[in-house]
Each structure stands twice: as C-alpha cells, then as structure tokens.
Image (tube, rainbow, N blue to C red):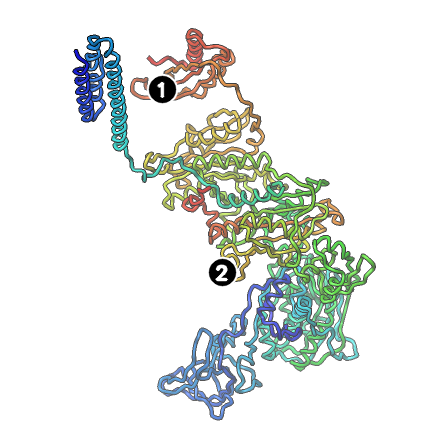
Amino acid sequence: MDLEALKQELATLHTKALQELEDVQDTKRLGEWRVTYLGKKSELTTLSKQMGQLDAQTRPLFGQLLNERRQALESAFTSKREAIESAEQNARLAAETIDVTLPGRHTDVGAVHPISRVIRDIEDIFLGMGFMIADGPEVETDRYNFEMLNLPKDHPARDMQDTFYITDELLMRTHTSPMQVRTMEQMHPHAPIKVIVPGRVYRRDEDDATHSHAFTQIEGLVVDQGIRMSDLKGVLEAFAKALFGEHQRVRLRPSYFPFTEPSAEVDLVCVHCQGRGCRVCKDTGWIEILGAGMVHPRVLDMAGYDSSIYSGFAFGMGPERIAMLKYGITDIRQLYQNDLRLLRQFAKV
Amino acid sequence: MKVSYQWLSEYVDLRDMSPEQLAEALTRGGLAVDGIASRNQGVEGVVVGLVRDMEQHPDADRLHVCQVDVGQDELLQIVCGAPNVAPGQKVPVALPGAKLPGDKQIKRAKLRGVTSNGMLCSAVEIGLDTRLLPQNQTVGLYILPEDTEIGADIVQVLHLDDYVLDIDLTPNRSDCLSIRGLAYEIAALTGKQTTFPTDIDVTLPNEPSPIRVRIESDRCTRYDALVLTDLQAVPSPLWMQMRLLSMGVRPIDVIVDVTNYVMLEWGQPLHAFDAGKIADSTIVVRQAKAEETLVTLDGTERRLDDDMLVIADPEKAIGLAGVMGGENSEIHSSTTRVVIESARFDAPSTRRTGQKLGLRSEAQQRFEKGIDPAVVRTALLRATQLLVQLAGGQISGGVATATTDAESALAQRVPFSPNRCRELLGCDISDDMMHELFRRLGFTVVEDSENWMVNVPTRRPDIALAADLVEEVARLYGYDNIPSTLPLGPVTIGNRDARQRILEQVRNMLVTRGLFEVRTYAFTSPEAYAPLQLAEGNRLRNMIPLAYPMSDERRVLRTHLLPSLAEVARYNLAHRVDGGAVFEFGRTYEADALPITQQPREREVVAMMWFGTLPDSLHERARPYDFYDAKGAVEQILDGFGIVVQYERAQEPWLHPGRSAAIVCDGQRIGFVGEIHPTTAAGYDLSTTLYAELDVAQLVKRHTTSLLVESLPRFPGARRDLALVVNKDVLVGKMLECIDELRSKREILRFASVFDVYEGKGIGEQQKSIALALSFGADERTLTDAEIDEAVQEVLQVLEAQFDAHLRG
C-alpha cells in the first residue's frame, strides 16, 4: 500500500465520520456511531492494521496521522456527547416544570397572644437593664394589696380601684403593686432591688371598649441607696425608646398614688402620629402609658427599708393598652375574645 | 369636679389666662382637666322680654299671640305655643336673627297667618341642663325673676359666657373641692396672688344662742350652729343658681342654695335644719344606737348601726352626720327659723357610713377626704352673711359651739431637708427657689441651717411628710425640668428563672406546633361546670365565690381550665372557624374548704385544646384532630424537659374513658391528655374535642437541665423488624416498657419503637398486628447475626409470656 492512498482513505473516513456525527441527535445513535468509527471493528482499526504493510520509514508518519485522526474523532465524540446530554437534560427539566406560584407545604404555626407578646417584649427590655422578673398571687390579702401600700382601711383612695372582695381580708388583687412589698420583704436587706412583675389584676369595672374587669399589669420597682426621680425618668425613657423607637421621649405629669410620693403620670409621644396630634392622642401629641413615682417612705419603712437611707421608684403599666396602641386594636374585649381570626394575624415573628 | 371659670376669676386674676391656658396649667400641675365646656351652647341674640299682653291665636287653640317688651321702642308681636305663657312674665326672647343651640336660626315668620317676630324660649331651647332645674322650669317657658332687666342679653343674665372646667381630682386633693382651694392652687401654680377672703365680716348679736349643742362622740371634733329667723324659702338669685348649675348642683331655694354655695366656695359642707323640729332646742352629736332608724332627705328609711354618727335632739336622730339630713327636720316653704350647722366629722366614719348605706353626697365626699378645720366657723359666717343679704334673715343669738379635745386647727409643722430633696429628685434646685415655691403655696419656712421646718396651713391635709413637700417642690418647679439619668448602683444581671424559662419554652413549642395562645377570664359560674359531670364532693366544685360579683356568669373563681377553653372553642366554631388548637397558661384557685380563711393555692397549668378539623390545604386533606395530636404535644413538652412519664387510663368524668390518660411521673399525676367525654363536649356545644393539661410547678420541679452527650457509635448497628399479633386490648406502651426492661440484661438491645398497628383483614377479629423495630449495637465491636438473633428470641419469649404475642404468620 502506499502512504498517499492510506492517507486519502483516512481523510475520507474522517470526513464521513464527522458528517455522520453531525446528524446524531441522541445517546443511542451516538453509541452506535462510536462503535462504527472508534470501536474494535471500526474502519479506523482496520486501517491501523494495514499500517504493517508500510515501510519502516513511513510507518511512524502514518501512525502519528492515525493517532491524530482518532484523537480528533474522540474529541468530537466527547463534545457531541456533552451536547446531547445537555440537550437531553434540558428537555427533561422542561418536562419537570411545576407551578411555582402554588403555596408551599406548611407546618401550621400558631401564635403567641398579643398581650403575652407585649409582656415578653417589655420583659426583654428590662432584663437588658438588669431587672429580675417576679410573680405573685392573684388572690391577695387586704394587707398587701392596700395597707402595706399606704392605703389604710377607710381611705378614700381605695375608691380609685373598685375591688372584688372574697372576704373582708381576701380579695382579687387590684394591681401588681402588692408585689412591691412582697419583693422587698423577700429581698430584705439586700440592695439594689430591680424587679418587674407582670400579672393579672382585677377591678369591678363594667367591660366595655376600654375597660375590662380582668386585665394585666407590669409593675416595676427599683430600691437602693441614692435612687433619684431623675433615674425614674431615665429608665422609662430608655424603655420607651426600646419599645417604640429612638424618637421617643417621656413626659411626667404630677399625679397621685398612695404608695408613691412624688407621683407622676407618664406620657409618651403618641405612637400613632409621632406627636403631631391625632384622634388617638386627642390632639395632644402625648399618650398616657404609665403611672409612676418615688416609692412612698411609709411603704419603704413598712417593708423594712429605712426611708432615710434608701429610696426607690416604682411604675406600673398596662400591656393591654400598649398592645392596642401597637397593633391597632380598638376594643380591649377583643384581647379576651380569643377569636382565631384575630390571633392568626399574630403568627408573625 | 366641675368648676366655673368666672367664679375662680373672682379670686385670682385670670385676665391673661384663657380657660384653655388655665386647664393646661392645672393639668401640668397635677389637677388633670378632662374637659372644658362653654356654658353657652350656641345662644346669640336672645334678650330678656316682658310679656305685656296676650291673646288667643284666632286659628289655633294652642297658640297665643303675645306682645313682648324687649326694651325697644315698640312691642314685639310673638306667637307662642308654650302652655305656661302668661302676661307679666319675664322670659328669654329670641329676636329675629338670633341663634339657638343646635344651629337653629330664628326668623320672622307667619304662624297660621299671624306674624311672629321671634320666639319665647324654654330652658332647653337656650341650652340649660334641665336635669338640674326644678320641674316647673323644665316644661314650657323658662321664667326669669321679676327684677331681671328688660332687654338684657340672656348670655349675660344667665352667665352663659362662663366656662366649666371638668377636673379629675385625685383623692388626696380634697382642698381643691372648693373655689377657695382652687384659687390657692392656681395662685401657687402661676405665681399670682389670690384675693380669697380669710375672714367674713358679720356682726353677731351679743347674746347666747337659743340652742345648745353637745358632742358625745370622738368622731366629731367641732360643731358650730347658728340660728336665723324670718327666712323665706324663696328661689335664690339667678347668679347664684347659675353658679350652682355650672358646678352641677341643683338650685332648690335660697336657704339650701346658700348652704351648697358656701360648700362649693369654702369646701365646708353645711346643713340647714328647721329649728322648730328640734326638741328641747338641743342638738346632740352621738353615735347611732343599734337598730335605730332614720328617714333621710331622699325619703328612704335607713337602718343605722352604732358605728354611724348621727345628729340628734334629745328624743330622736335628725340627720346622718356629714352624709345626709333627716326628713323630720327638713326645711319647708313654711320654715322661718333655721339652724345652720357647720361641723367637722371624722373622715373614715363618714366614709364607712356612706358606703354601708350606699349614699354618696357632696358633703360626704368632702368629709371623707378631710376638711379644713380652720374654716368651720368662717364658712358658717359666710352662709349667715348671704342669708341675711339674700333671704332677709335675722341672726338669733351667737354661735352655739362644742369642741372635743381632739380638735386642733393648728398648722402642721413638717421637717424638710433641702439637700435630701435635691438628692431624691436628682435635680439641683436652689434653696432660694425652694423658698419661693413654698411662699407661693402659702407655706412658711423656719430655717435652721440644713434642716427646715415648713408650716403647712390646715387647708392642705395631704401634706404630712417631707416626701409630700418634695412633691410640692417638684410639681411647682416642673417635672419637665427634672433631668433623665440612670441609677448609679452596682451592675445587676437580669435573668429569667427556671419557671419563666420553662413557660417561654413551652409557649414556643406549642406555637411551633400550630397552637394559638389564648387568655380567658378567671371568673366563671358553677353552671359552666355542669357539663364536667362532677360528683358531689369533687374538689373541683370548691369554687371560691366573690363577695359582690358583677354578674352571675362571673361569680366564682375557676378550678379548671377546660370550661374556659371549651368556651373559646365554642365561640370560634360559632364564628365560622373550622377548627383549631389553643393553649393557655392559666391559674386555678383551689380551696380545701369554703369559705376560705387564707389565700388559696393558685395552681398554674398549661392547658391545651384541639377542636374541629385541621385546616384543609393543597398538600394535606382536612381531618379531625384526634388523641394523638394532643398526646404528641404533651410528649414534645415532656421529652423536651427530659421528664419520663407513664400514661395510665384516666378516671375523670369529663374525659372519654377509653381515650384518655392520666400523665404520671414517679407515682404522681402531673396532667391529663384525652378526648373530652362526649356528654361533656355536648354540654359545651362541641363534638370530638381533645384536651390536655400539665401542671407547671411539676414541670419546674421535674425538668432536667443537664445535658451530656453520648459518644457516637463507632461500629455499625443493626435493626430487626418484628410483626407481632396480640389481643386488641394489649397496650403497646406496656410492651415497649417490657422491652425497655430487658435492655438492662441485654446491652446490645438499644432501642425499640412501634411503626405500625394494623387491625382487619388477615388478623383475627379480637386481635391486632404490631410492627416493632428493634435497634441493636455495641460500643466496641460489630455484632454477629447469632447474638442479634439470640436477643430477638429473648424479646419474643418475653412478649409471648407477658402479652401472648406471636410472630405474624
């Protein structure tokens, strides 16, 4: 055989193989093509066997040529295979298309009650300021609910809190303030005391949009040497900013509670209008959120903390009111109706 | 308290303060003004007119044609339909163009053919509060006194240009229940002077009083009485009536009105007795006798007790001291001799009496908060002065008076340290400033280097301690001027304790499982517990009753949370909610016996309820909740806190006997889980409903916090599944417990779980097939089939012996 003839044959074969490869469109045909052109019984193999007939001088040349052609075909095969596989996968993926707008699979999640949510938020703020959380009895004695808070029997200020009595001496607590006394008695003589007390309280009010015979309160108490009224203002300001945002300020107005002196009503910048004036704040720009004051010296003395050495402040707030302001609830009764259609709206982080 | 702006301005110069500015100053000073009302509801162009002449309307029976003198050159012809119209009356006349409340405009008009140049007005039409007017002034025309000036603007005549401030007084400021107190307060807040008189100039006859007074109880410290004769119980002058009206007091006659007027002005309640009704001209102040009765001015017979203080003559009680007078000594139109009482009664006693009898008079409200002893006499003289001026009274004798030893009208001396004040407020207020503030309050200061003594006048009974003075300083200095600081003390760590952490964790677990937290009321009724089918003597029946409940539905404290949650379920199902799962952290109030004598146990539980169906979704079909939903929640909580329990058949009458369990830990019951008894459920209008509760104190007591990891297995383990046939009534839990016990003997047996329970085809009718998975493993080697087989055989033997379990063929 002469080299040129073989070369020619090889070139023809190569061209034919590439042409056929061009037409291959699926994996099966590609396999067949591979057997035909690159397999043990392929023409290329046949050609390589003829190499022996060449003389020793031209044999390596042809061998090299043969290798190049084989490599070229194998490379074409690989490219083709990748192209086909890619096309086939694309087709498969296209067939697997689903409606991504359909809802996902859920584990149904419930929700924390809005009042608990507010209490938890407030607890977290005061925990951050180093307060402990305490808890106390709802059925209280007259002594702790009133007398130890500087509200002796027959004191007119008892009218401020219409009371559910059980017996002459036992009653449903009208505020969380008895825990001021219980905490001081328990902690005595330790100082400082920094505690908040969330809990349910009861008053003989007709239930309406803004009143409930049962509601919750969060009491706060700080007792130490050197506690000042300015500290009360500062702590409540920090609280207000944490709960309602950095723009918050507090305004104290003189008021009266038998167990604090001086006493104050505490207003925050209206959370609804940011102080511009609206229906929620009756155009004053302020909303009343807390009652507070310096712990009355008699209360300190009765609980065992000498009022000439110690001083303290106390405050009380209503999570219901805060929940109503925060979440736009207009009727306090909704907070105790437990309508799932309302509660579901709180299934948010 | 409602207060007249004009009346106040008589004693403090308010020309530079509008009612709004005054309200703001008072509110910022601690006297919260809830509202400002103009007395003028929209009256303009109404004048006083005299009905000169009157004729029947030619075409209308009920109308009259009046000729009215309004001070103009000619009489006005006005058609009037009021039944009480009569010639000679002075009445409000709305001239053409006048405006009346409710945006009414008066025009010249023809009424049935007769021209009417305006309208004669009733009390309602000029915006007066008729609730406080005598009956005869509320129907038909409002009749003005004869001496009213014709043509005068009704706004001036009736003081409609006044404003009424509604002050929400705190109970400590009894001093501000009067014009006097408010005048002093405004002076202190604004730095103005008050011109309120300190004395009344009345000349009393220099002869003894015709009556005697005697105090027989320590609950009255002073009793002054004065007799006036020749009085006539005629209406009081219009200005006085209007002032009373503006402050919410009903005008009656001049005698009563003067006592009320002076009370409003001076804060000292007064009472007028018919002197002729007092036996032996002797007034005795004493405690009532048990079972004594008295008919009070409101016509009600009151049964008294010996804790109450009465005014009496030697024969009978004639009044409830400081609360309400008696009918038997009431003033009548024929009364001419009157005893005016001005006294000081014990505050708590007055309060108790009012509470016991359900009476809250203006007088009582002042006495129970404490009155100023310094003005008992002055107020009496002021009333005397007015009665002489306005009712033609003649003073009969001097003041009859009695006092007890307890009487002390001295100013309080309160020690005060300006340094301590600055310390407590965190505010650098100078000594000079404090001096100035006390001066404005009318307090005098005796300075002794660092310690001051502040003399507080008796009109301020709320100031007794240094702290009270600190508040006065802060209040007048301005709370706004106090800076914001943070406490200086040592750093403290804020932490939730174990109980609080557990509650938070349980709450989060349940919420993640799809339960909604609810909050229900602690008050309920025994009727709401009827569906629980509690036997006589069941402790849950020991419901603590409220002494004075507001309704039958909320008259006792709850002993169980199930009825509360059942109500939530019922409410939601009735409001088109298909179903849901809810939980509550709530307390039950447990008494061993009733009535309670000490605080009851307050047991905190987490109660859960599943009602209706799980919501339908794209991926899962709706299904009713069942027992295992409830048990899964309970298990999740208990597993989470490492609490190992047994589930034993529950015996509660409100639970389905076959589908409920008591949750028991170390022999103690810590909760329940189960389906509510169908009868109980029906009682709450519910169908299949699940309930579970866990005792929070038990969770706190039994939870384990330690967490030590087990090393991971280094050698592969093995699993063998067994299908066993047992009788239907065999409890799988017991089988698993039994396998669990074997683990101590067979260390390679690691774990057993159930993965299928089957009843039906291929299984005997009274039987069920249980599929168990057994896990095997060893720490130091790979197990051989032989030893696993041996262990499985042992499990099979034990299960056969104890439960008659056989491998499914």
Which chain's residue wears label 1? B
Image side of residue A36 versus residue A176, left or right: left
> What residue does disc 2 label?
A278
Q: Residue furthest front?
A: A57
Give SS at disc 2. loop
Res B684 quadrant in image: top left
Judge whether A215 appears above or below B762 on screen: below
The N terminus of chain A: image quadrant: top left
Where is residue B602 shown, x and y percent of the image?
A: 58, 39
- Front residue of A187 and B727: A187
- Front residue of B630 and B478: B478
> What residue does disc 1 label?
B768
Amino acid type assigned to the residue bearing label 1 in the image? Lys
Q: Which residue lies furthest to the bottom in this view?
A: B73
Q: Residue furthest top?
A: B786
User: Which of the numbered marks, if any, corresponds to residue B152?
Assistant: none
Amino acid type assigned to the residue bearing label 2 in the image? Cys
Q: Is residue A163 visible?
A: yes
Which chain's residue wears label 2? A
